[in-house]
Amino acid sequence: MVNFKLLYNDKIKSGVNFRPIAYKCCCATLQSERYPYLSEASLALVSDEEIRGLNRQYRQIDSSTDVLSFLMGEPNFETEAMVLGDIIISFPTASRQAAKYGHSLERELAFLTVHGMLHLLGYDHKDKQEEGIMFAKQEQILQKTGIVRTV
């Protein structure tokens, strides 16, 4: 059993009841990685403009993207939980990608949530080998949640 708290902020009105899916994906990722600590993370759905500003400010890349992760890895002394960090998802980009790949918006948001959580747990995709490992883990986790591609 995973002991996890999700701080969720839907900064744009998405019309999607995503909080339970996000929670399920975060817990499944922690379970898959056998993460042993009480933990918390925050997740926000934002506009393309907002994620572009964050991407420019923190990565010096002046374009929007689908998901950004900001690792904290610090204890919250009030809750005694490990604060993993923040996951920021561009809702408009996720919507476009869902249409492009022919699957549901919920599935694309779940994919991006798992992707962000894996970044918070130390995974990256700077080269083909790392990318292969990370993307295989994403698909494995999504399979376990039952949130799979339906094309």
Image: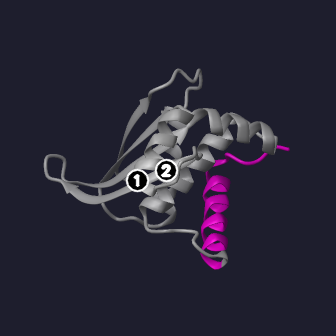
> Which of 39/127 is in front?
127
Most common SS among magenta residues: helix
Sequence-first tag of 1 and 2:
1
The boundaries of the magenta stretch are 129-151
Quadrant of the snapshot with the C terminus: top right
> Which of 25/122 is in front?
122
* Residue found 44% across the figure and 68% down from its top: 122
User: Does the rendering let one see residue 1?
Assistant: no
Do the residues bearing badges 1 and 2 touch, measured as CB atoms within 8 Å?
Answer: yes
Q: Amino acid at mark 1?
A: Tyr
How would you rate the neighbour count of disc 1 (Cα within 10 Å): few for under 14, some for 14-19, many for 20 or more?
few
**What residue does disc 2 label?**
68
- Looking at the picture, does residue 52 appear above or below residue 80? above
- Residue 115: image quadrant is bottom right
Is residue 20 in the magenta section? no
SS class, disc 1:
helix
In the image, taking residue 144 as reference, residue 45 lies left or right, namely left
In the image, taking residue 151 as reference, residue 124 lies left or right, namely left
* Residue found 55% across the figure and 26% down from its top: 17
Is residue 138 in the magenta section? yes
Query: In x, y percent, where is residue 148?
Result: 72, 48
SS class, disc 2:
strand
**What residue does disc 1 label?**
58
> Which of 145/139 is in front?
139
Question: Farthest residue in the right direction?
Answer: 151
Colour mapping used in the image: one colour
Query: In x, y percent, where is residue 7?
Result: 36, 38
